[in-house]
Amino acid sequence: MKKWNFYTSKEIKPEGWLRRQLTIQAEGLSGNLHKIWPDIRDSAWIGGEREGWERVPYWLDGFIPLAYLLENEEMIATVKKYIDAIVSAQDDDGWICPCPKEKRAKYDTWATQLICKTLKVYYDCSGDERIPEVIYKALKNYYELLKNGDITLFQWGKYRWFETFKSLNFIYEKYGEEWIKDLAKIIKSQGFDYNTAIEKWKKPSHVWKLNTHIVNMTMMLKSEAVSHELLGEEYTDNAEKLREILDKYNGTAFEGFTGDEVLSGIDPTRGTELCAVVEQMYSYEELFAHTGESKWVERLEMLGFNALPATLSEDMWTHQYVQMVNQIACQKTMIMAPFSTNGPYAHTFGLEPNFGCCTANFSQGWPKFALSAFMHRGDTIINSVMLPAVLRDNGVTIKLETNYPFDNKMHYYIDAEKDFNFVIRIPSFAENLKVNGEVSETKDIELAIKKGETEIELEFQATPFLKKRPNNLYALKMGSLLFSVPVAYEKKMREYIKKGVERKFPYCDYQLVPGTPWNYGYSNENFKVNYNVVGDIPFSQDKPPVTIKANMQQINWGLKFPYRTVCRKTPKSTQPISEVQEIELYPYGCSRLRMTEMPIIKK
């Protein structure tokens, strides 16, 4: 396998629209959560009395690389405050979580796995030389407790055992001690084998179970890739087998899975949890790094350019707990929630519209995506995702100017003090590839870059097409972008206090009430692409950077009984009830209310 190594925020810096997106995140909820949310501000991790389990590690996992990517001194100072508190509170025996010794056996050590992973992220960004020993002591203590039977893996720790391997691989590479391999084997032996749960994924469930929990599903996709080397096992690409099954029975147009807590079947009006989106992105980043297989990066782009921005407000002060592919309103449902086990506000935008896990965890999405722009192996550098960024690596500087995925033009400026090999990953959908104006075979570009200055201009085309979806519905794709009929809406703001947590502008709750038609089908497959300026808000619904005009007609779609704000899974009829209209479709990530899977109207 062609294994690639990640760069850190010391080598990669965002540029262009990507930097604007990260800045919006820093100025929004991610960058301010420690000031306004008690579970972060007053967490037991820093000596307070609020939650002392997953929420601070979750938040730091994204806040840390965000701070260092933007070189934001105030945010970096906050990072150090939290890390110093966590490090200074570590017990002499290595135990690191805020839990008294007598309660360890009942403490779900998913938090141990997560904080060690987060500390590795911090070490990569900061180079703080305390951290390897902190992780070493924490995992050595974990090993002793598990080996002696003082604790066992249960609940989340049992179902997320593989998350430990980011830090396990790190300390094995640094220390090379045999107990680390023994710990790896113990963790896997006590962890859950997802291959035994496949049959349960084939039918939607309304029963809350860990073996069908959407976030567990997306996390586990990377399990074999991150663990097989340390375990001494052969890599079998088990992730592909499991992904195919999940997609067949629970797939979405943006290539994630439905899961409004548990797997929810093939239905564009079911929800997908925000935690699942960012964790599936992270799994694909790790899968590409460990295998070098481009399929994982293409799937990563579908999530990062579509599902991630769609479920966040433009200012990133609020988010949904679950998004819907066909989402005609984000309003509280008055009878019961249209989801498996989530509540009636789960698809509205807010500080904490359902469980608070997503409030803490969504921060990792954009920063880790940015850190996937370039990777390296030996004397070879690969541009794995065409994001606008600058790489500085041991005398090599590569600057990529691009508005990809909104257009398909790339300009590389290279200044090298030495020779190196440079690979540019070309997406499988690319057509008419040109490199420096010359027509090229459509495959990854491999170049031997000589010492000095080099410029590379690269462009290709992507053709819009209707991708077949279940139930005779279709989704419009062009490259890595999915397109939807945007539905204009009115925002209804709600400020209140619940369980001591205040919601007030700009981190209050919003319901989105639709104001334009949504009941469309495609009249034909003739499409016109319009490229616009990428504005200060890259995924803006008012000023989308690219649109596609399609010929469409309204149909009698109907509402899902007994709801007034949820459309049917499939339309009542595909007979047109209007003349042909030219409708401008927006990128899915720009459309907070939208119709994405629609029929072709038969004449």
Image: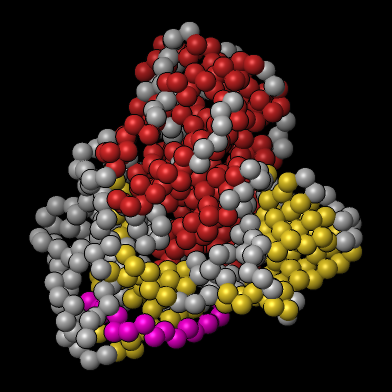
Q: Position of residue 53 (x, y in %)?
A: 43, 30
Q: Which residue shows up at 32% across the image and 38% down it?
A: 198
Q: How many marks?
A: 0
Which quarter of the picture shows residue 90? Answer: top right
Report the side of 158 relative to 295 (left or right): left
Image quarter where the C terminus lies is: bottom left
Which is more toward the observer, 335 or 369? Answer: 369
Image quarter where the N terminus lies is: top right
Task: Say if 89 sits above or below 557 in the image.
Answer: above
Q: How is the image coloured?
A: secondary structure
**Residue lying at the far bottom of the rendered structure:** 579
Report the side of 537 relative to 181 (left or right): left
Q: Which residue shows up at 73% across the image and 46% down it?
A: 377
Asked if residue 522 is among those painted magenta in the image, a careful observer would answer yes
Q: Is residue 54 visible?
A: yes
Task: Say if 47 sits above or below 545 in the image.
Answer: above
Report the side of 561 relative to 467 (left or right): left
Q: Position of residue 225 (x, y in %)?
A: 54, 38
Task: Say if 438 sits above or below 79 in the image.
Answer: below
Q: Which residue shows up at 28% across the image and 72% down it?
A: 598
Q: Position of residue 469 (x, y in %)?
A: 32, 64
Q: Which residues are magenta?
A: 515-535
Q: Is residue 505 visible?
A: no
Q: Position of residue 536 (x, y in %)?
A: 55, 72
Which quarter of the picture shows residue 471? Answer: bottom left
Q: Which residue shows up at 13% across the image and 72% down it?
A: 572
Asked if residue 426 is among those painted magenta in the image, a careful observer would answer no
**Residue lying at the far top of the rendered structure:** 148
